[in-house]
Amino acid sequence: MTNKITFGSVFLYGTLTIMALFFLMPAYMAMVTALKLPGDISLPAAWEFPSTINWASFSDAVKMLKPNFINSIILTVCATIGSTVLGSLNGYVFSKWKFKGSEVVFTLFLFGMFIPYQVILIPLFQTLRAMNLYGGLPGLILAHIVYGLPITSLIFRNFYSQIPTALIESGRLDGAGFFSIYFRIVFPLSIPGFVVTSLWQFTQIWNEFLWGICLTRHADNPITVGLAQLAGGQAVSWNLPMAGSIMAAIPVLAIYIFLGRYFIRGLLAGSVKE
Amino acid sequence: MREASRDRLKAFLTLLPSIILIGVFVYGFIGETIWTSLTDWGGSGALSLTPEKNFIGLANYVELFTGVLGGGFRQDLVNAVYYSVMLLVGAVGLGMFIAILLDQKPKGEDVLRTIFLYPMSLSFIVSGTIWRWLLAPQGGLNVLPKYAGMEPLDFQWLSSTAAILEFNWQNLFQILLYVAAFLLILTGLWLLKKDSGMAVKRWLVPGIAVGAGAWLFGDLLPEALFMEETHGFNLATMGIIMATVWQYSGYTMALYLAGFNGISQDLRDAAMLDGASEVGYYRHVAIPMLKPITISAVIILSHISLKMFDLIFAMTGPDNAETGHPALNMYLTTFRANNFAQGAAIAIVLFLVAAMFIVPYLVSQYRQRGRR
């Protein structure tokens, strides 16, 4: 590409700048509003920079959302580990130990990823109640592990199908069995697969709301539910919900900004074909 | 050989717990919800662990589609259809456009890609909270023109009660036939260049016949409702559509960008040598080659718009009639009104619509894997 200013390059950079501003607009608005004193927030001056920087909104938001934040950390870490480990084993079987009908089973798994979750909500609610798991985090963790299986199995299956079958065969000739092949050959090669899958699951579970609001009681609400309640009250001034939004966004934004490459791979894997 | 068969057994046993979990939690639960939707589970005592359920057939569905109280649900369904279509057009269009711009390899491509994709990592509750503030009637987006020296807007993004493209639900069957005719004719016109004989015979003639039939004999069709009831595209959903497009264009952009990068430079050079312009290259070479990506994007976006709950909840609250959605209606019906059977029926309607997209998609994916 040349450095000459042409109509094309003006159009290209001009359009990209306008679009980038449109995409950054909500982030700017959230930051500016969170930093204002409640009295300084007014609708006509919403875009203006705060006259005095007020960090107190963040400490207030942390104080109010801290229990939810901790719940979300526990929930997300446990459910991510569970669904990733199971997904890795499933992907190993689906790609290297195909049996008669395993492709059909795999397709039936994938279907579970595309259902609107409203359709399983009522039986899930009743089942967790019958198992005495309703209202707390263990029930929510179980739900996230089970419904995470399709996507984690899919990512690992696609990942493992890149491992040459010859490698597995040579392991078998050396007398290694199903599990020793997994632990000695496949698992050491799957660190990137684990990173991609666990980051993807982490963001999905962190951001989930429907089960959070339907299946947990107040003390065990995850961060999304806590934020919705904080923002839903009419009396609160807008600096608090904005600070809360930033707080709820930070863990996933950090993943996205620092480990974006892996995040995008998970995102592409989610579209089934790679 | 005995070793090998024992390993096979181990492989199957490793998978078995997951098969059982998916079997129960996905397929068993769907069956359970179908059964629930055919009962009268609700009212007082609904929250007991062993609630009283009596089989009442399709009465819940009949109520949703023809009952007096189902009017809210019918508007929600109309909202969901408009919402899905607008989201598909918006997010696929904008995402493709940005991907083409970034495929020109401008300076700072990495930073720009990060900016376009970051909304995708956020929770709908986070983005919904922020967008609600951005769309406040006397502030946010509406005052932006002021900075360019223009009059501020006064559009009620989330609370407008106006609706456009209104229709009478009584004429539903006629309208569906018009839509079918329109789609047939559109496909026919699109195929006209490729294979004109097939296009006319298979698509254009049937399309025109269906359209003319609906126009001439539409009055003979039964009315879908016993009373007049108008539904339309509620303008209050514009704000929600805009926020969703903002959040998901980056996703389609990433899909297309990965696709563009997968097309070899040789092919691109060859197209250019044949005299294709930049626009021509994308229109006739790149975009048609990425048809599988477009299909994936359409499937995933329609799935997202069909189950949309969090974003609407955060932007307008769960019980704003103007911006209602079947997914929210299901939540309110089930967990606020304790009408479990009716909630299950709404969930099944959503499920069937989603399955219409997903089942053919998964079946074709399955066949492709078999061929490889």
Image (cartoon, grey):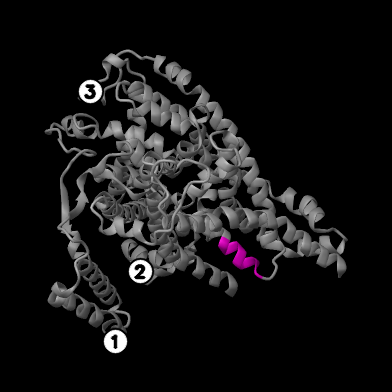
Given the image, on which type of amino acid does mark 1 rest? Gly
Dot 2 corresponds to which residue? B284
Mark 1 belongs to which subunit? B
Query: In the rendered image of this protein, does residue A235 appear above or below residue B235?
Result: above
Given the image, on which type of amino acid does mark 3 rest? Ala
As measured in the structure, the alpha-carbon distance from the residue carrying label 2 to the one carrying label 3 is: 48 Å
Q: Is residue A107 magenta?
A: yes
**Secondary structure under the numbered disc 2 in the rendered image:** helix
Mark 2 belongs to which subunit? B
Dot 3 corresponds to which residue? A45
Q: Residue at x 34, y 32 (%)?
A: B130
Dot 1 corresponds to which residue? B197
Image location of residue A163, percent across then percent down? 69, 59
Give the left or right position of residue A123, taking residue B307 as reference: right
Q: Residues within 10 Å of mark 1 (few under 14, many from 20)?
A: few
Q: Is residue A234 magenta?
A: no
Q: Main secondary structure of the magenta part?
A: helix
